[in-house]
Amino acid sequence: MAPADESPDGPRDAVVVLHVDDDREFAALTAESLEREDSQFRVVTEQSAGDGIERLAAGGIDCIVSDYEMPGMNGLEFLDRVRDIDRNVPFILFTGRGSEEVASEAISAGVTDYLQKEPGGDQYAVLANRVRNAVERYRLEREQARSQEGERYRSIVEAAGDPLFALDARGRFTYLNGALVDLTGYDEDVLLGADVARILVREDARRGSHVVRSVLSGDDGSRTTELRVFRRDGSRIPCEIKITRFSFGGTSGAVGVARDVSERREYERTLRRERARYSALFENTDDAVALVEYDGETPYIQDANGAFDSLFASPDADVVGRPLDEVVAAKERREEARDISQRVKEGTYMRGELERDTVDGPRTFLWQAVPLADPETGTVDQAFAVYRDISRLRERERELERQNERLKEFSSIVSHDLRNPLNVAQGNLELARATGESDRLDAVERAHRRMEDLIEDMLTLAREGESVTETEPVDVGELVADCWEMIRTDGTRLDLRTRQTVEADPGRFRQLLENLLSNSVEHGGTGITVGDLDGGLYVEDDGPGIPEDERERVFDPGYSTREDGTGFGLRIVREIADAHGWEVTVTDGSGGGARFEITGMETVR
């Protein structure tokens, strides 16, 4: 008999019986008798139901034999507690209180068997037989249940889409499902008993074996790693493999699941390529590009390429994290920018031409905004803002428009202004030939000089109308004095009231001043004044002046009040002013003469 405080040991197929009876001597006698009846019996005795519950919970009990009448908890109450722990362990009620009432109650409660205590030793043979039969049924039912459970699990494993396998304590295959056979291309009998490294590429075999050993040794209960499976046909498949240690029935090993991640890896490679292309395009395009993310209705810059930074980022402030509208739009354009951002937030693709404020001042952009919607919700939470600087293009277009206007003017001059003196010359030449009158040749000479003057002024007009690209500081007083030395005549005087220095093309500025001074002298002015204005200067004479209704016409090509004038002097003045970005106007002088004002000049001092 095994002592009550010892865990029973015995052969592998020993039957461990828990006998609970408050009569210590009877319990000892019963244990000895049962072990004598069957050498496979190992009897554990307890004197109370409470102690019996603790022993059952410790495990290893094959059958329970219990008295009915016991202090604190009777046999049927004990049975209820037993079923909470083990619903199937055999429970035999072995009691001295024999009655149909107890027997009926015991059967209703679900006892395995009911046996009444009797005098003499024959009762132990009967009890041993009842125990033996109950345990055999219990073990058979348990084995059948395990077998059914095993078949159920096997069916589940075989039906699983992922390749599954089991390894023994040395890392050799003991089981693999059909999905693993399909994955590797090897027959099941080839892999069973083979090391796990058999299915791995050579470069991954050592690492895979290390992972398996780490799990089997207990260093890691479970490991997930990526390994390449070497298929029978020589191809390689990247797999994510999870290996977990397990122990069952005294046997230890590991189970694993392999998942083909080829599509995932290909998707990741595609994604990396797309990101690389996007990054290359984003960083190398000449367009200024910003990726914005909306917080409520406000687009905040999340990323910006170098072209965007060079246009909009000040040296001491990063644009990332700032509201886009505050970065690109001045206060007076902020409302327009917010309206655009709101429409983009609503999913509207927008493009157009607009003016935005850069670190170098306002510039003209061809602009577009591309809303980026969440594929699941459809909500626009990001957008691309793309700015193409077309300021130079628009300036070039304006320059072409100016050139076209000059071509039209030249065409008019050639067809009208040059044709008249040419006709005069041809007519007089024919008359001279016909009549022999030599004085006709003087008229021809005058016509030729007239044409020469027109051609010279046309060439000057063509040159001076081109945009100014380079300027330098020019002292206005010194330049006016130099020009006056070439123009002054007896009886004229110059009153120089300027001390400015302005940014200008010196050669063209000289031409402008010479033309204005010459115009004043030629039209009767004897007193000429050159003075300063805020951001400009004026040239004023004391001549007859220009009627108000003719003041705009004086800048038209060919307009002149003198018969020998070409009418291009003041036109050249306007062309030079326009080429600098200045404005020239004519008004009354303080003494009644003409006053020409030039404004929009950049003064140095």
Image (spheres, grey):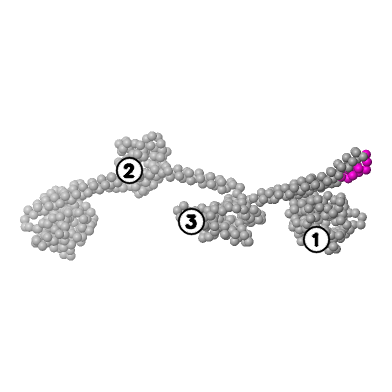
* Circle 1: element type: helix
Q: Nearer the viewer, mark 2 or mark 1?
A: 1
128 or 106, which is in the foreground? 106
The tag on residue 55 is: none
| Comes first in the chain, label 3 or label 1 | 3
**Residue 54 in the image, given as x and y percentages of width and height:** 22, 58
Q: Amino acid at mark 2?
A: Phe
Could you tell me how far apart the alpha carbons at marks 2 and 3 are, in whole angstroms? 45 Å
* Circle 3: element type: loop
Q: Is residue 478 left or right of residue 109?
A: right
Please rate how many residues cluster around mark 3, counting C-alpha atoms within 10 Å: few if below 14, some from 14 to 19, many from 20. some
Could you tell me how far apart the alpha carbons at marks 2 and 1 are, in whole angstroms? 104 Å
Residue designated by label 3: 379
The residues colored magenta run 436-447
The tag on residue 548 is: 1
Q: Is residue 302 visible?
A: no
Residue designated by label 2: 165
Question: Looking at the image, is 581 positioned above or below residue 243?
Answer: below
Q: Residue furthest front?
A: 434
